[in-house]
Amino acid sequence: MADGKPRFKPYTRPAGGWGSAAATAKVLLEQSVITKGSRALLAMNQPGGFKCPSCAFPDPHCRKTLEFCENGAKALAFEATKFRVTRDFFARHSVSDLMQQSDYWLEMQGRLSEPMRYDPATDHYVPCDWDTAFSIIARHLRCLETPNQAEFYTSGRTSNEAAFLYSVFVREFGTNNFPDCSNMCHEPTSRGLPHSIGVGKGTVVMDDFEHAQAIFVIGQNTGTNSPRMMTSLVEARRRGVPIVVVNPMPERALIRFTEPQDILQMATLGSTPIASEFVHIRIGGDLALFKGMMKVLFERAGKGERVLDEDFIRTHTTGLEQVRAEILSLQWPDIVAASGVSEEQIRRVAEIYIRSKATIICYGMGLTQHQEGSRLLQQLANLLLLRGNFGRPGAGISPIRGHSNVQGDRTVGIDEQPSDAYLNRLRDVFGFEPPREHGHHTVAALTAMENGSARVFVGMGGNFVRAVPDTERAYEAMRKLALTVAISTKLNRGHLVHGQEALILPVIARSEIIHTKAGEQFVTIEDSMSNVTASRGVLAPASPHLLTEIEVVCRMARATLPDSKIPWERYIDDYSLIRDKIAEVYPDIYTGFSEKIKNPSGFHLDIPARRLVWNTPNGKANFLLFPGLNPDTRVFDRDMLRLATVRSHDQFNTTIYSYNDRYRGVHNDRMVLFMNEDDRRQRGLDAGSRVSLETITDDGVLRRVDGLTVLDYPMPRGAVAGYYPELNPLLPLEYHDEISGTPAAKSIPVRIVAS
Ligand SMILES: Nc1nc2c(c(=O)[nH]1)N[C@H]1C(S)=C(S)[C@@H](COP(=O)(O)OP(=O)(O)OC[C@H]3O[C@@H](n4cnc5c(=O)[nH]c(N)nc54)[C@H](O)[C@@H]3O)O[C@H]1N2
Ligand SMILES: Nc1nc2c(c(=O)[nH]1)N[C@H]1C(S)=C(S)[C@@H](COP(=O)(O)OP(=O)(O)OC[C@H]3O[C@@H](n4cnc5c(=O)[nH]c(N)nc54)[C@H](O)[C@@H]3O)O[C@H]1N2
Ligand SMILES: [Mo]
């Protein structure tokens, strides 16, 4: 538990600044990595160094000596920590004992240091040498009735090289079951945008931020989750570029920010206002906002104003008329009610959009994690297409990805719905016939585990049971498995909720040196803007017993597929051989990989939409129809509130660094419910009272979380927020986007019940 009394005090200063510097120093001290940590910090995101293990935002131009970022430093400190989870630790604590501990406590125990196997006789993890571990995996995988009984999860810290080999191994083994953290994250981007613009990635690069005339930041807590992006926003604001922030929570860093890189600002305690326009949207109200903006454009175009880019629309797009008709049929009172935003403000925001000749729209989980997340994003694409905001400097769509290599992993084959063209190349390059049947994403994998058709789960990083919806069901599903394998760096709940047999396989982390028989190796990652860069660790590995992720994959492959013709052993030592294979399988984007990666600032993977080439079936960018104003299924209940589950400033996904959320004024507590004061009064509740939340569903299952403290917070009416993963028990597995499978973690229908 938190070691202090819960305290709630609104935070009124700018975000960033000295508070950030102090927090960084504190965390380095706590994890006892002051000198080692500072040395590593100097190498982070520098040419020749390693890539920050935290978020996927690109480095701002590689030009600063110390790219300061509080949350990057935290991610590093917790990776470089001096604490270790040893065999003695597991001997002291049974798994049932560990299950009683909090996620925070588990994380604080430090780095995993040797492979372990679960012993059901004693309920303890016991040491297990690597060869035994691989033979256990092989035994289980080889006795399955079909390879589709195994699920191979990936979390987005895994390098391109490791993820690529993992995807080759799993396909040679015979399945496309690739549940991925991306399935809970930016999958609506990957699945929704290709129908619109022919590519499921962003079309913006760093330079575009310097040419943009307006920037939208939608559903994203930038100062906490992609802090390096703040530098671009500060610079844009100083140039007078309007920034429109759309969020149900007035996130502090998006209101006012002190740039820790700016010595003058730091010295004078100055700060920059960020949002020139803050749109206090209802949860899920974005669809109505986008449509309202489009309505303004269509209405004004109808009066003869040149607010649409007619040339662009004529040359590059189809489908405008049906979209125009739908939008013009919508009534303003409905748009205002659904968005929670006044017509006046929607017109003002539309005006900002119209005046800008180059607009970037950035977005995060506030848009993707809805029941119709993919179609919601297609409407965002419509909005951009109307003014031709593609293929010109300073314009485009910019999904801000989560994990540092989540985009790269998908590019190199972590995909449960691979195309035939890709599978053919894989066959030609590696000489085996890959499975053609599409596999499971995260929700489907969980369903298969639940109904007993899945028998083995392998997790390449991550913390599956804690990240997925319906926590109780997920625990039960996991416990039905014959074998669970966790390839990890830190202890987490996923090691404790396990199958009949279970393995923990500890690996070398991003910040650590990889030394093989062929000498020192580096890996590569792809950031949110499709730049591929090298990452070379600088710290000694946390333990001599760790393997690289690559070696784990290769030895798992060799043990499972003894007759495989693929030279797995060679890839263990020489990563350039892996890159050569990546280049062969993806000639369009990766030709010359080994040469190009010598450039210290890496290289950009082609995004056809940037060149106005549309990889859609009709070769055009498409205006797509999504009738209505609500991206979430309607459940009717008089007392319904929409719950967004969000990250605090002191966590990385399921990893909890502390119980504080500085910018939201929360200290020593994570069981809180951010709520509008009038919603609270209407329910006869006192501020600070304890309540329970129940999910509104029609499946007859009671989903309930107790012990939440109500905080008065500037939320829109009808919207509440609380923390992930504590509130995941409230999120039904079935509440997900049909197109992408992404759970609607930002819009859970709930009601408050007395505690
Ligand atoms: N330090 C740190 N960095 C991280 C992570 C971390 O946990 N810690 N996680 C990484 C990962 S995997 C990811 S995906 C990203 C996540 O980064 P973000 O996308 O910033 O993630 P969240 O904190 O989940 O919430 C996003 C925002 O959505 C808003 N929101 C909620 N509902 C709605 C809505 O209906 N409409 C709109 N417009 N906004 C809404 C919330 O108020 C919140 O500000 O960050 C990555 N970086
Ligand atoms: N309710 C709700 N649920 C959500 C979300 C939400 O906003 N709300 N967000 C969703 C999102 S966006 C995401 S991306 C998922 C995140 O889901 P995951 O990616 O599965 O979760 P993480 O917490 O990032 O995983 C942390 C674990 O990864 C391991 N790890 C760390 N670094 C490495 C490494 O270098 N190699 C290996 N092999 N292992 C490593 C450590 O053991 C650590 O405990 O959660 C999703 N779930
Ligand atoms: Mo994510």
Image: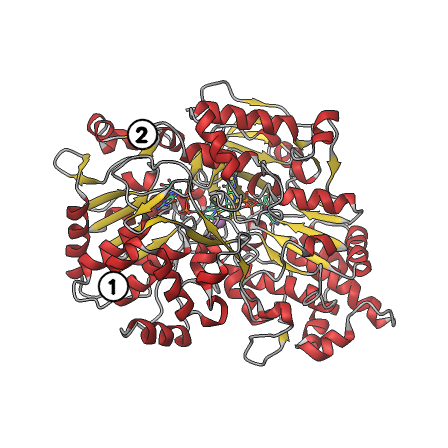
Closer to the camera: disc 1 or disc 2? 1
Looking at the picture, which amino acid does disc 2 mark? Arg
Q: Is residue 174 visible?
A: no
Residue 582 is situated, as x and y percent measured from the top left of the image, at: 40, 65
Q: Quadrant of residue 272?
A: top right
Q: Is residue 54 left or right of residue 457?
A: right
Does mark 2's beta carbon lie closer than 8 Å to ligand 2? no
Q: Is residue 545 above or below residue 93?
A: below
- How many marks do you count on the picture? 2
Q: Could you classify mark 1 by the number of other residues whose Cα lies within 10 Å: few (under 14), some (14-19), or many (20 or more)?
A: few
Q: Is residue 549 above or below residue 454?
A: above
Q: Name the secondary structure under disc 2.
A: strand
Looking at the picture, which amino acid does disc 1 mark? Pro
The one of 751 and 373 positioned closer to us in this rendering: 373
Earlier sequence position, callout 1 versus callout 2: 2
Write the residue at 64% across / 50% down: 218
Does mark 1's beta carbon lie closer than 8 Å to ligand 2? no
Q: Residue furthest right?
A: 304
- Quadrant of image for the N terminus: top left
Q: Is residue 12 above or below residue 121?
A: above
Q: Residue furthest left?
A: 121
Marker disc for residue 170:
none
- The CA distance from mark 1 to mark 2 is 34 Å
Which residue is disc 1 drawn over?
Answer: 567
Which residue is disc 2 drawn over?
Answer: 84
* Colour scheme employed for the rendering of this structure: secondary structure
The one of 63 and 733 positioned closer to us in this rendering: 63
Q: Quadrant of residue 456?
A: bottom left
Q: Is residue 376 left or right of residue 346?
A: left
Q: Is residue 665 above or below residue 422?
A: above
Q: Quadrant of residue 561?
A: bottom left
Residue 55 is situated, as x and y percent measured from the top left of the image, at: 52, 45
